[in-house]
Image (cartoon, coloured by chain):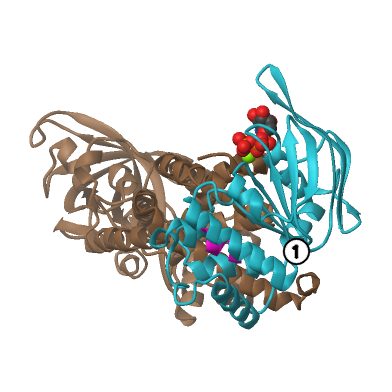
Chain colours: A brown, B cyan
Amino acid sequence: MASTETPPHGRSHRVRLQYFAMLALKNLFRYRRRTVVTASAVAFGVAIFVAMASLLNGLAAEGDRNLANYETSSAAITGAGYWRQREEYPLDILVENTGQILSVLDADGVAAAPRVAFRGELIVHYDPYPEDGSVYLALYGIDVERDPQVFRLAETVNEGRLPEPGEDGILISAWLAERLGAELSYPVTITTRTRDGFHQILDMDIVGIYQTPNPTVDRSQIYLPLDVVDTYLEMQGAVTAIHLALPEPVPGAADLGPVKEALERDREGVGGTGIELLSFAEMTEEFAAAVEIQDVAFNIVLVLLGFIAVVGISNTMLMAVLEREREIGMMRAIGMRDGEIRLMFALEAAAIGLLGAAAGLLLGARLVWYLVNHGIDYGTLLEGVEMDFRFADVLYGVWSVRTMFTAAVGAAMLAAVVALLPVRAILRREITESLRRH
Amino acid sequence: MITVTDVHKEYLDGETHVRALRGVSLEIEKGEFLSIAGPSGSGKTTLLNVIGCIDTVDSGSVLIDGLAVTGGKKGDLIEIRRNKIGFVFQSFNLIPVLTAYENVAMALSLLGLPESQIRERTMNLLAEVGLSNMEGRRPAKLSGGQQQRVAVARALVKDPLIVLADEPTANLDSETGEAILQLMKGINQRRGTTFVFSTHDQMVMDYADRLCRLHDGLIESDELRRSA
Ligand SMILES: Nc1ncnc2c1ncn2[C@@H]1O[C@H](COP(=O)(O)OP(=O)(O)OP(=O)(O)O)[C@@H](O)[C@H]1O
Ligand SMILES: [Mg+2]
């Protein structure tokens, strides 16, 4: 009998699959309302997901950029073990051979900027200030010529200027100026300690006011000329760090190899084991934890969106499947396998999911386009909120094809899973029972 | 070809036990045109379902082509249904989104034939059941009789060992029902396909070569009406 012949396998399988796909597709139009409702829910979820991901990725990228541009640079040379203790502003873990290192780097064409970071108390008095006040701050001696080649601080000076070498002038943030009631040319007194621990008092004038997109910098850092700091703190040429600007497409992607080699060549001259070369990743290790929290938050959002989508599509999907119980019973009676029936419904649901995902991606792409080009103005929202987060007032999104792809595939799979639950329930019933339904 | 021996089947309907089959034995030979007749609730559907491997028995045995199907594995039963059994249902049970052609071809595609063969066989059968030129219509665009013809074509297209039809004319007016019976009878005579159909309609019984009367889950009489 012809029916018992076993035909060549691969091709027969493909023909069968074609029929299943055809039936799945036709059923999309049979339950038009179901298709539209489900696809809309999926589209909504995908669009929100894509936009959220764009913003969160934008947040991470912005955070990295703000770290690199105003705090860490792409790499730094410090005294061995300095970075872990940098929040205490130690002046006993130093880079001693600053000049030698700079000439090695200069010879290699690597832009480098030495800085001395220290702590001090900034004191202001009534008249010209509205009232007496003092604040503990981080102070940075910066090489006025070299610093702009590595950091972008100079570009953010919007009143006055950078202090000049040898000048008793400081650069403070607009944020601090507003809180102190400070203006250009107002005097300040700074008390601190020298490298050897002796008390020192610096009388300075405000020569510039800056505003970076990095709140951490704005809220805690003021800048002075490196040579002035060197004199008052008796640093004898030593610095706390030499920051490097290396070519890199995104922060953290720089190749440290050449710098390492250059330093190796003059090992003794640059300070031997007394110094270390830190990558962006090493300097920002502690923020990686923050990013992980961000990832967790992201996953929670994802689960919530998934939940909304499931609730949105499960009812319509459920009805559309349960309504076809007798049809499923017939298919089983004429010899369709459970797996084939599941496959057919999965194809149908996945098609709805993909349809929704396509619409969601269109909408999402529109949202992302807006976020990339216009951003969201967070500034007013976060005014006065203390956050150890580095982002600007305006947050921009970034494009991520991978996220979009993930969202589309995820939506299709989600829809398939939701459809398969009622199918599974029906397949558990007796065929005769399904056939008796109306 | 098909041997049913002392089959018992009981359903639990809430608290009460319903004895649908109480020891049914039946021998069906190749090429028979057999009617199972009996009043409502006599066990006709149950018997057809047991023969069609979509229902189980409590005791007794069913052999198809010498193969015991009672207590068979699920996968084996699916293979038997797929390859050897054709079903015609009282309410047609066509897939509404598929055309007449697709409804028939879909069933055939399960056998894993190449598309060209599926096409040839499907078109031939649609012509045989009198639906040439209607292959592109969906069930909603066909009359009840035409829908049942599609269903007959679907059952026959795989060239099954046996076609089981549970009250195939119950949803049709008598004229259309008779036409379906003539169609099945013709196929039975031309091709030698075995048909077993249930009914409680005298006109339908009159078409049968052999008539089994079922009553309360027991075979009451089994008579040859004319030579097959
Ligand atoms: N799944 C089931 N659960 C409970 N009782 C059932 C089930 N299937 C059949 N029955 C009962 O078994 C008996 C035989 O049913 P069956 O459907 O085989 O009769 P039938 O001869 O086909 O009747 P009809 O002419 O009404 O179709 C009936 O009393 C019916 O109510
Ligand atoms: Mg019945």
Q: Which span of residues is magenta-colored?
A: B148-154
Secondary element type, mark 1: helix
Q: Which is nearer the eye, A239 or A26?
A: A26
Ligand 2 neighbours mark 1 (CB distance < 8 Å)? no
Q: Label 1, on which residue?
A: B83
Residue placed at 17% from the left, 28% from the top?
Answer: A132
Q: Which is nearer the eye, A282 or A1?
A: A1
Query: Residue B120, how many percent across, how many down?
Result: 61, 81
- Residue farthest to the right, as pictured: B66
- The chief SS type of the magenta part is helix
Q: In this view, does B125 lie above or below B44?
A: below
Ligand 1 lies in quarter: top right
Q: Which is nearer the eye, B68 or B190?
A: B190
Q: In this view, does A63 lie above or below A148?
A: above
Left or right of A180? Residue A258 is: right
Quarter residue A111 falls in? bottom left
Residue type pointed to by label 1: Asn
Query: Residue B184, how many percent across, how many down?
Result: 63, 63
